[in-house]
Amino acid sequence: FKPVTTATLRKMKSDGTPITMVTAYDYPSAKLADEAGVDMILVGDSLGNVVLGYDSTLPVTLEDMIYHTRAVCRGAQRPFIVTDMPFMTYHGSLDLTLASVARLMREGGCKAVKLEGGREIADTVRAIVTAGVPVVGHIGLTPQSVHQIGGYRVQGKTANQAERLLEDALALEQAGAFAIVLELVTEDVARLVTSRLSIPTIGIGAGPGCDGQVLVFHDLLQYASPSVPKKMVKTYADIGSAIRNAISSYVDDVRERRFPGPEHSFRTEQREPAVLYG
Ligand code: KIV
Ligand code: NA
């Protein structure tokens, strides 16, 4: 296999080949995503919700992102691995921002970082790109600003919002971002943005007009995902039920003394010592 690069992704956009992305947070999820042939893995700060059990992405730390990125990098070789910069790690001085990026790349091992925001972070994006780090933008519903937005709602419904989204996307492209995630954006705005950019758009809840799609691992698989089923998610398996049923069978077996059986147990071959066999 050839590892996916930013050049591969650029070519996929110009060829009209859909880009596939899924989140992963540890070795097994990354390994399975790689084996399934996904093009990009996002070590999303959604790990705050789906892996760590927080009710938002705000408590997620840089250390959390580094730790999970390392595990993902050990599990996946072909996909292009992008890590989210967590809440408030790219809004202070440029020095602090670049130090955070350096830790994610050097200690975590990701190939690119993703930042939430539009025009207001364009200068930051430019500085990171100038340092040689590929950047993915993220506009529309940006969960790190949930308290400012006032909830998880669809973006781009008014003409005003639509225009702002397009301007944000263009500003990010101008700043050097190599791709942009569009989250919870009306499908016509997503299609417009996609047609106006030369870099790929990757949608979640943004309709079929994007250059690629991303879903959260635990949502896609119903893997104890804490969120109520969302319209934007298609679930492809009910792994949560499979796991729950399996564990419950194990619990029953132990309680009913069906496990372990002779086939799972080991015997002492020697007829000594006497203490065992009298
Ligand atoms: O953290 C995440 O999983 C994300 C995706 C929803 C794009 O940012
Ligand atoms: Na995220």
Image (cartoon, rainbow, N blue to C red):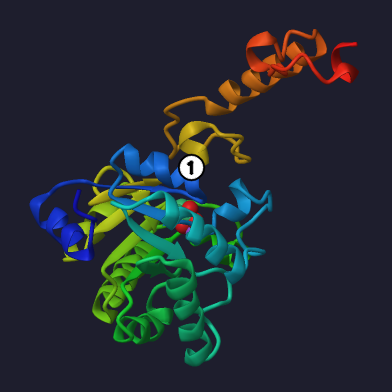
259 sits left or right of 192 in the view: right
Q: In this view, does 233 lie to the left or right of 35?
A: right
| Residue 120 versus residue 147 in the image, above or below | below
Dot 1, crowdedness within 10 Å: few (<14), some or many (≥20)?
Answer: some
Whole-percent x, y for residue 58 in the image: 63, 64
The one nearer the camera, 33 or 203, is 33
Residue 78 versus residue 200: which sits nearer the camera? 78
Q: Quadrant of the C terminus?
A: top right
Left or right placement of residue 59 versus residue 162 in this view: right
At x 12% / y 58%, what residue is drawn? Answer: 11
Compared to residue 153, the image places residue 251 above or below, namely above
Residue under circle 1?
A: 28
Q: Give the percent coordinates (x, y) of residue 232.
A: 43, 40
Amino acid type, residue under disc 1 in the picture? Pro
Give the x, y percent position of residue 47: 57, 53
Q: Position of residue 122 (x, y in %)?
A: 36, 81
Farthest-out residue, left: 15
199 shown above or below 16: below
Badge 1 element: helix
Q: Which residue is drawn at 62% across and 19% down?
A: 246
Front in this rendered view, residue 38 or 249: 249
